[in-house]
Amino acid sequence: MEPVMAQKTLVILALLLVTFSGGTGLTLAISILSKKKTSSVSVFMHGVLSATGLILIVIYFVRHIEDFPGRIVLLFVVTALLGFFLFWKDIREKPVRPIAVVFTHILFALLSILALVDWCFF
C-alpha cells in the first residue's frame, strides 16, 4: 500500500493550484472593490488555475469516493458556480458588479481551501 501522502499527491497539487488562483483572485477582488477594470490576464489565469484544481479534485473524488468527503467537492463546485457567474458578468462588461456575489465567492473559496487543508493534513 502506498504511503498516505503519496496517495494524496493529486489533491496536494490541486490545493497548490487553487491557492495560486487565490492570489490572482485577490487582485481581481481589489480591482472590483475599487471599481477599476479587471485585467483580462488575471481573469483568465484565475479561471484556468481554479478549473484545473477543481478537475483534479473531482478526479480524486471519483477514484477515492469512499475516502474523500463529498462536502469538499460540493464547496468547490459552489465556489466555481459563483466564479462562473462573476466571469459571465465581467465579460459582458456590465457597469454594475454584484459585490455581494464577490464576497460570497471569496467566503466559499476560503471555506473550500480550509476544508481541503484540514482533510489533507489533519
Image (spheres, rainbow, N blue to C red):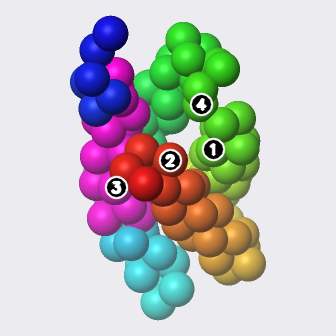
Find out whether the residues at labels 4 and 1 contact each other: C-beta distance under 8 Å.
yes
Q: Which residue is mark 2?
A: 119
Q: Which residue is mark 3?
A: 19
- Choose mark 1 or mark 3, whichever is in front: 1
Report, in whole angstroms, how far the alpha carbon at label 2 lies from the one at label 4.
8 Å
| Residue 21 % position (x, y) | 35, 53
Q: Residues within 10 Å of mark 1 (few under 14, many from 20)?
A: some
Residue drawn at 34 percent across, 55 percent down: 19
What element does badge 2 sit on? helix
Find out whether the residues at labels 1 and 2 contact each other: C-beta distance under 8 Å.
yes
Q: Which residue is mark 4?
A: 68
- Choose mark 3 or mark 4, whichever is in front: 4
**Residue 10 lies in quadrant:** top left
Q: Amino acid at mark 3?
A: Thr
What element does badge 1 sit on? helix
Specify the label residue 72 is tagged with.
1
Report, in whole angstroms, how far the alpha carbon at label 4 lies from the one at label 1.
8 Å
Task: Say left or right for 31 vs 81.
Answer: left
Q: Residues within 10 Å of mark 3 (few under 14, many from 20)?
A: some
- Choose mark 4 or mark 1, whichever is in front: 4
Of the numbered discs 3 and 2, the one sitting upstream in the chain is 3
Q: Residues within 10 Å of mark 4 (few under 14, many from 20)?
A: some
| Residue 72 % position (x, y) | 63, 44
Report, in whole angstroms, how far the alpha carbon at label 3 lies from the one at label 2.
16 Å
Magenta part of the chain = 7-25
- Choose mark 3 or mark 2, whichever is in front: 2
Q: Main secondary structure of the magenta part?
A: helix
Residue drawn at 28 percent across, 15 percent down: 2
Q: Amino acid at mark 1?
A: Ile
What element does badge 4 sit on? loop
